[in-house]
Image (cartoon, rainbow, N blue to C red):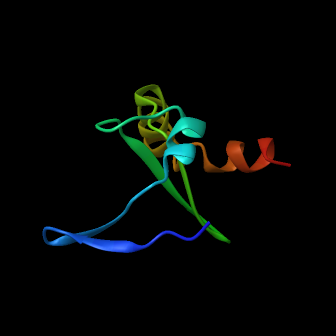
Amino acid sequence: MKVEIRKIGNSCGVILPKQILDKLNVKEGDSLTLAENESGITLSPYDPDFDVFKEAYDKNSTKYRNALRELAK
């Protein structure tokens, strides 16, 4: 699906088609999470609980680096 980048104030934005908004179950004013990956980006509905877990992970990932590496095997 082709979308166009448009100027919005001093930024740029993409207008998401209604079918994508319905699929994500979001509406105007809702927040999305944008994640970069190898093939581009992923948009998903914003989950405030995820931020709490991410902050905890970021805080402890260095401290428990070796344990996390072993668990990932």
Q: Is residue 22 left or right of residue 56?
A: right
> Image quadrant of residue 5?
bottom left
Residue at x 43%, y 73% (from the top left corner): 4
2 to 71, vertically: above or below: below
Instruction: Compare residues 44 and 24 and report the one nearer the observer.
Output: 24
Q: x%, y% of residue 61? A: 54, 46
Residue at x 70%, y 42% (from the top left corner): 67
The residue most toward the front is 18
Viewer can see residue 19 = yes
Q: x%, y% of residue 29? A: 28, 37
Residue at x 62%, y 50% (from the top left corner): 65
The residue most toward the left is 9
38 to 51, vertically: above or below: below
**Could you tell me how many numbered marks the image carries?**
0
Q: x%, y% of residue 59? A: 43, 41
The residue most toward the top is 49
39 to 52, vertically: above or below: below
Viewer can see residue 44 = no
Residue at x 40%, y 29% (from the top left corner): 48
Image quadrant holding the N terminus, namely: bottom right
Q: x%, y% of residue 49? A: 45, 26
Q: Is residue 25 left or right of residue 37?
A: left
